Image (cartoon, grey):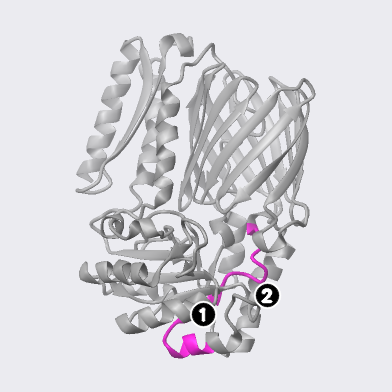
Amino acid sequence: MKRLVLILAASLASSYVQAQSSYVGFHLSAIASSRFETQLQFALTEGSMKTRWSFREAFTVRFVQLVAVLAMLATSRGEEQALILGYHHIGVSNGVTQEVSQVELERQLRSLLALGYVFVTTGRALETLETVPLVASVTFDDGYADAYSEALPVLRRLGIPATVFIIVARVNEPGFMSWEQLKVLRSAGWEVASHTVSHAELTDLSPTGLERELLGAKETLMLRLGSPVHCVAYPFGRHDRRVRQAAAMTYDCGVTTAPGLNTKRADAWALRRPLTSPLDVQGLSWRAGSGTDLRVALLAPAFAYWLLPAGAEGRRPAFYNPARYELMGDGQLGFRWQGGNLYQDVFLRTGDFATSAIFSRLGTGYVEVTGTIHLAVAAFGIGWSTEGAVLATALPLGGYGEVWGRMSVQTWALGAELIPLDYARLKTEVNSDRGFSMEVGFAPPVMVAEGRPLRMFSGLDGSWYGGSSLRLGGLETSLSVDATGAVGLAFTSSW
């Protein structure tokens, strides 16, 4: 409590200082534990903003920032914590985050045992926190055969159980485990859980598709193995509120690839699970206290972004929904080059609270930060932007997307994002400033086992444009060209 008081006092003090000076900026500071401090500082000069904020305006921004700080404080080092480790291949060379040797696996697990961690299956992680302060769970995604041939001997030797998330359609295929091997794992104390039927990209599915992938996988596993199935791991770590709701109707828990640790208050259908790689051999003991993984490197461009200059006051891009919640996971960090502007897009969710922010540099300068709370039937947001105070709301559409509205002192917008069919997406917006915008996207049936990573899209935003994107796990890159020949580039990390 003392920390929160200090954070609020510091925020109000800096609000007063910035309101009285020519420097307009904002500073987020969160002491997440006695060992770690996270600070995010962004600034815009008065010349870039072309404005001067009053103390009341700065206070409003501080209030929104405090919501973000509270979200960042979701995991406190003083609480009981469950660390869920995510592996793919063991002893097989197949990528930075997938290749871990038997020797490296044993070193990592022994380092956690030395720290006092108690290992359980994922389905028992949260309940074990009731009596044990440090809990760890080892997971293997996809059901590769090396989990049986390489990982099982190591874990047997250490007396550690594990959870294996199975792509049901790939059981008995070359390189994957058989039903008989899965029964052996069950007998060894392992948990056999779901990784959906076909490893589909769940956030691209309609309600019918979600039921097919989630319920279908559970029913098949229970029928073939004769035992309960408690958990599901979302393919590629991608999920949204629709996915979490569908999982809650079928499973006792859902696992993401979000970095971080899990407390007793954690969302059971959005359990955090940092990725594990060979680079963790020396650093896993430290990383266990923070739940970070290789994606921490993405913070470098996020901070470097603020070294870039900003021009005259700009405007937000099309389709930006400040009250987004229904179609979002736990977090997103994106960069987009469009119309001579470099945008940075940030989203963080903790339970029913979320923080959204959009910034632009180079061509123009724009800032918008919004805190959102999700209630029973809608999400409501309040924030501040270059245009002044912002109010926003979003309403879910029965699992098919959401409609949203945004209003500031200067502009208003109404929009929708729909998923009418599996792997099809429609975005529309009517804006008092730019008029009508729309975009239609579709993922063709290419590399279906990898969630159809290629996406095609076209739309209208001042002029017609078209492009494509490629996903690799939680990462996505896209390229677009409009009718004037202007090129747009984007990079996004979602978890």
Which of the two residues, 282 or 23, is positioned nearer the viewer here? Answer: 282
Residue 179 among magenta residues: no
Query: Which residue is at 54% across, 14% downward?
Result: 313
The residue under label 2 is 169
Q: Residue 9 at what x, y percent from top left? A: 25, 31
Question: Which residue shows up at 29% across the image and 68% down it?
Answer: 107
Give, as a single range, the part of the protein colored magenta: 183-202
Taking the magenta stretch, the answer to whether it contains residue 187 is yes
Q: Position of residue 145 (x, y in %)?
A: 54, 77
Give the residue displayed 52% in from the left and 12% down from the top. Answer: 311
- Can you say whether 368 is above or below 443 in the image? above
Residue pushed farthest front?
93
Disc 2 residue type (three-letter): Ala
| Amino acid, disc 1 | Val
Determine if residue 368 is in view: yes
Q: Which residue is mark 1?
A: 192
Residue 296 drawn above or below residue 284:
above
